[in-house]
Each structure stands twice: as C-alpha cells, then as structure tokens.
Image: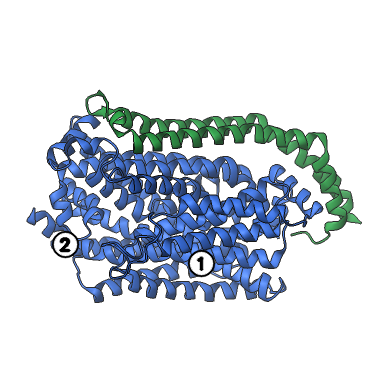
Amino acid sequence: MSTLAAATSTGSPTLNITIFVVFVVATLAIVIKVAGGKKTASQMYTGGAAFSGRQNGLAIAGDYLSAASFLGIAGAIALQGYDGFLYSIGFLVAWLVALLLVAELFRNTGRFTLADVLSYRLKQRPMRIATASSVLAVSFFYLLAQMAGAGGLVSLLLGVDGAMAQNIVIAVVGIVMVAYVMIGGMKGTTWVQMIKAVLLIFAVAVMTIMVLAQFGMNLSSVMQGAVDKNPAAGESLLEPGLKYGKSLTTQIDFISLSLALVLGTAGLPHVLQRFYTVPTSKQARKSVEWAIWLIGGFYLLTLVIGYGAGALVGPDVINAAPGKANAAAPLLAYELGGSVLLGVVSGIAFATILAVVAGLTITASASFAHDLYNQVFKNGTATQEEEVKVSRYAIIGTGAVAIFGGMLAKDQNIAFLVALAFAVAASANLPTILYSLFWKRFNTRGALWSMYGGLGSALVLIAFSPVVSGSETAMIPGADFAIFPLANPGLISIPMGFFLGWLGSVTSKEFNRAKYAEMEVRSLTGHGVAESVDH
Amino acid sequence: MSNDAQPLGERYIAVQESEEFGDLRRTFRGFVFPVTAFFLAWYFLYVLLSIFASDFMGTKVFGNINIGVIMGLGQFVTTFAITIIYVRWAAKSFDPKAEALADSITAIDTPEVKD
C-alpha cells in the first residue's frame, strides 16, 4: 500500500511533468501551424465553420470527456461500483436530446453564439443580455470546477503538495490555455481537443485490454476481483444503491441529478458552440453521431477500468492516496504499466483540463464580445476587427478569472460546481432553446422568464442546499441554512424553467409572424446557412 | 441576419404555409417526438428501477452479470441503435424533402436579389 501511494505522489513527477510539457509544446506547435495569424470573428469563434462532422465529433468527445468523466467516473465505479456506472449512462443518453432535437436546427438558425438562435425571432437586446448572463454563469461554474480540479490533480500526479505549488500549476494551466485560444482561436482549440480525444481513448483502450487480460478477458471475473478486494462493500458493489440508496433523500437526489444530466448536456454553451464549427446541419448531425459512438465507447471502457481499479488496486490504497477516488485510474495505470503508463495517463489528464478549459473560454469570450459588446453596447455597429479585439480582451479576462477563481476554489467541494452548471443549463438554456425551435407561441417574455427563472431558481436552491451549508462536506461547514434537502436542484428548477417559459408566453401578446416563419423555414431546410458562412 | 425582413418575410410566410413545408414539419416531428418520448421514458424507467428496486436489479443472470448491468448496457445499445436509425431515416426520408424545399426557396430568392 505505502509503495503504491508513495509511487503516485513521488514516484516519477519528473516523467509526468516531461510528458505534460511535451504535449503542450507539440500541441502549441500544431496550433501555430494550423491556425496562427490574424483572425476574423468567424475564425475566432467557429474556426470558419470549416471542420468536417467527423473532426467535430472527435473534438466534441475531447471537450466532453473532462477530467470529471475520466478520473471521476472510473474512481466512482472503483469505490461505489454500480452507482458510478449509473452516472455515466446519464452523460451518454443526454446526447440523444442533442442529436434529435437540438444540433441540426441550432446549426441552421445561428452563427456564432447561443444568443443568435434565442434572439432570432424575439427582441434582440433583452434576449442577448439574458442569454449572455446564463452562458457566462454556466461557463464560470464549469471553468472553476475544471481549474479547481487541476489544482487537486497536482498533489496526486506531480507529487507536489501545498497551496503554493497548486496555485502555480493553476496559473500555468490558465496561461497555456489563454495562449492556445489567443493564437489558435476555435480552429486551434478544436485541434487540441481532437488530439486529446485520440490520446485519451487510445490510452484507456490499452488499459482496458491490460485489465481484461489479467482476468481471462471476462468482465464478470473483473467484477468478482473488485468484490473480493472490497470485503466492506462486497456484493453490493455489483448492484445499484451503494451511494444513492442510503435514504429517500439520496434516492430523490439521484433522480434530480439524472434529470439535470440528461437535459443539461444539450444546453451547455460550450457543447452548443461546437455545432457552429461545421458548415451545415448535416455535418452537425454527423458530429453528434460520431460523438455518441466515441463517448459511449469510452464509458463502456471506464466500466472495466473502474472495476479493474477496484480489483487490482483496491479501495484501501485508493482512499489512502491523495485525491482519493480521482486517483483510481492513475493508480491502476501505475499497477499495469509502471511509471511510464502513469506518466502518460497523468499527462493526458492535464491535457484534458486544458482542452476543456480552452473550449469554455472561447464560448464565454464569444458571448461577451458578440452579444454583450457588439449587439448590446454597440447596437450591432462594431466592426469585425473591433469585435475580435474585444474577444481577445475577454479571453485574457476569462483566463484571469479562471486562474484566481481556481486558486480560491481549489479546496472546495467541486462536485457542486459541475452539478450547478448542468442544472443551470437544463433549467435556463434548454427550455428556452426547445420553445424557441418548436413552439410557435413563444415570445420574449416567455424566454426571459424561463431564462432568468431557471437560472435564479437553480442558484437559490443550491444556495440553500446541503452542498453550501449544513453538512460536513459543505462549502461553509460551520453554518447551517440548508432548508432545501437536495444537493441537485434540477428536479425543481428544470420544471420551473419550462413552466415559466410557458406562463410568460401565454400572458404576452407579442408575436413576430415574419421572423417566426423565417426561423422555422431556415431551421428545417437549412436555407440561408451557406450565405452566412461566406460573409 | 437579414435586414430586408419585409418582402423576404412575406416569402418565408408563404413557404411556411405551403403544403410541402407542412409535410416536412410533420415528417420531422413525427419521428423525433415519439423517439424522444421513448428514450426518456426508458431512461427514467431504468433510473427509477435502479434507485427503488435495487434488489431486483441485483438478480444475477450469469456470473456476476445481473439485471442492472444488462439494463445499463441496454441503455448503451438503445442509444447506439437510435443514433443509427435516426441517421438512416434522416438521409432517406428527411434530407431529400428538406433539400428540395431549400432549392425552391433559393429559386424564388434569386430574381429578387437583382432588384
């Protein structure tokens, strides 16, 4: 036990750092080569909409398979067994919402940002402000979670412990990310995400085969190994309930989380932004098709990785390691392939954070420059050059917020940040998107109510939930004002977003007949998309 | 987007109210709405069974593979299957109609642009 734990924290930090530096230098060189130089707004936000569906599907997988879904789910399966697996299914099924209802129509009706779609047939100014608020809020929470996660990974992977070292790593991640985005725009970022996706899926596939080889290529034997190694949990590792079955509250909490996961993905701004990087709705469809295969395949592999870590590393060693559950996959890598494989997995884990953070930064800066600066402050009169210049300032600003926010949040319980991002996306963005695309009667009041109502109720419920106060793992452990029992607000805030969108619409008479016709015709036929790309 | 909404808007309204467009909308919604209802119902059935019927889900079928694992893998299978079916359906039944309509709109558009 002590050798393994020691190996992870001190074994080969030099090797880990070397592999990470090689990755950063190699990808930066690629970014400069494919996407260096001056940029138009379209190149900055969408890579000129010039990616193929397959490339974009790969980039979506690179963007979506964050450290939380790689290290987090593998660790959850290793320690909580089936309940960790249950978690990954919500993340996958969610893509069907994107495939069937959102991706193609969204591509056909917008160009740069989520607000393009939502303000299409509604009043521009209030809709742009509302959408930008929600986009910036979701991006902020997600960004903090990723940066805080980067800090937490440090003690595990580089063997450096202590606040100063973690702060330095957070700053390095932030600065490298700003460099990618400034130099490469969306094109460069997309390439980083594609490369990272290939490396991650390849490494996890190799680890899966190595685990299965030790158990006669039999999943059932891997699961038996995990049961044998964990006498405290035993057979309950194989069935649902170990984590979420404790009480009625945890059961309902899981339903709430499931709802947020399955409806949140198609409302995440950085996921939606990826649909603009392809030229047509058919390519957007192809993107999601590829993403579903890659993400689904990856989660199937994490089932083996998770139980494999439970069987070969064991819960005692995982719990003793810095980073606990998050250490399961790296510890398994060390067990299987020594310090070289550990170094590779650690490097990929860092690359993962870089790629996700870069995608979030582009989305947030596009929303700031295109929606708030140009459309709201300048009434749409800013030139392309001005807008791109502002987006560059916004990237630096986002980088600074990510670095300082990450430093402050690094010791916090970060799970709530991710839950919050998904809950806000599902409560504020998704109702507005679906109504906008499918409901004739929808109007500005309905959109503002569902947007602010979903955003507000999610924020308020989280503030009064056990993740903020009243429990041992809370943000403010000393206080107790947790009058809302669930950790995830989705069960209340998502229906609230849909209800307010309906109520606002039926109480307002506003209806733009011509714009509604234009939007619907374009959304289904793809008419006009090619022209707007050429601009 | 387009600023000359007035004459253009009239034409979009005409397209939207046309027989062909109504047919396209029915085709699209006739597929995606029922399929969405199905996969959401199946997903929440699975979540609710996992949460409230964990003993049933723990029933072993072969080796350590129990009903819960089979149903979980079943979610992967249905997600992949819906993806394949939708992509094929769209290429065969939706895209031709959408493209024909998009072409006819472009045809109406072109002379107007010269004005």
Q: Nearer the viewer, residue A331 or A54?
A: A331
Q: Which residue is mark 1?
A: A36
**Picture coordinates of residue A418, whole percent (x, y):** 40, 58
The residue under the point 21% across, 49% down is A333
* Coloring basis for residues: by chain
Q: Which residue is mark 2?
A: A9
The residue under the point 25% across, 65% down is A154
The residue under the point 18% across, 65% down is A159
Left or right: residue A529 versus residue A214 is right
Q: Is residue A202 above or below residue A391?
A: above
Left or right: residue A54 versus residue A334 is right
In this view, the mark in front (2 or 1): 2
- Which chain did the renderer colour blue? A
Q: Chain of mark 1?
A: A
User: What tint does the image give chain B?
Assistant: green
The kind of residue on which mark 1 rests is Gly
Camera sees residue A455: yes
Which quadrant would the C terminus of chain A be assigned to in this image?
Answer: bottom right
Task: Report helix, strand or loop for mark 1.
Answer: loop
**Picture coordinates of residue A140, whole percent (x, y):** 46, 66
Cα separation, mark 2 vs mark 1, equals 37 Å
The kind of residue on which mark 2 rests is Ser
